[in-house]
Image (cartoon, rainbow, N blue to C red):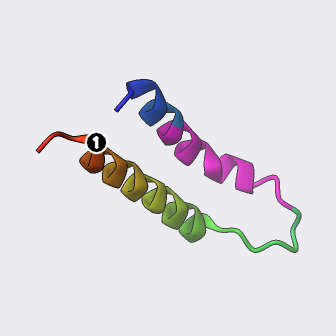
Amino acid sequence: MNKRIIYSILSFAFMLPLMAQSAPPATPIDGGLSLLLAAGGAYGVKKLYDKRKPN
C-alpha cells in the first residue's frame, strides 16, 4: 500500500481529537469516541493492506 495513504490516514486519526475540541458545548465528543474512530480506521487500513498483500 502506498505509504502516502497510510500517513494521511494516521495524521487524520491523530488530529481528530484536536478537531473535536472545536465542537459546540452541546455535542458530547470525548476522547473515547476519538480513540474508537482511530482504532476503526487503523483496522480498516490493516484489512486493505492484507487484501492487497500477495499470498
Q: Position of residue 26 (x, y in %)?
A: 87, 74
> Left of 55 or right of it: where is 51?
right
Q: Please name the residue shown 21% across and 41% down the image.
A: 53
Label 1's element? helix
Q: Please name the residue shown 28% across and 42% down the image.
A: 52
> Left of 52 or right of it: where is 19?
right
Give whichever of 20, 41 is nearer the camera.
41
Residue that mark 1 sits on: 52
Q: Please name the residue shown 63% across and 53% down the image.
A: 17
Instruction: State whether residue 5 is above or below residue 41.
Output: above
Q: Please name the residue shown 34% across and 32% down the image.
A: 1
Give whichever of 26, 7 is nearer the camera.
7
Outermost residue to the left: 55
Give whichever of 5, 33 is nearer the camera.
5
Q: Give the magenta part as a residue range.
A: 9-23
Q: Position of residue 4 (x, y in %)?
A: 46, 25
Kind of residue at badge 1: Arg
Q: Which quarter of the figure has residue 54?
A: top left
Magenta part mainly helix, strand or loop? helix
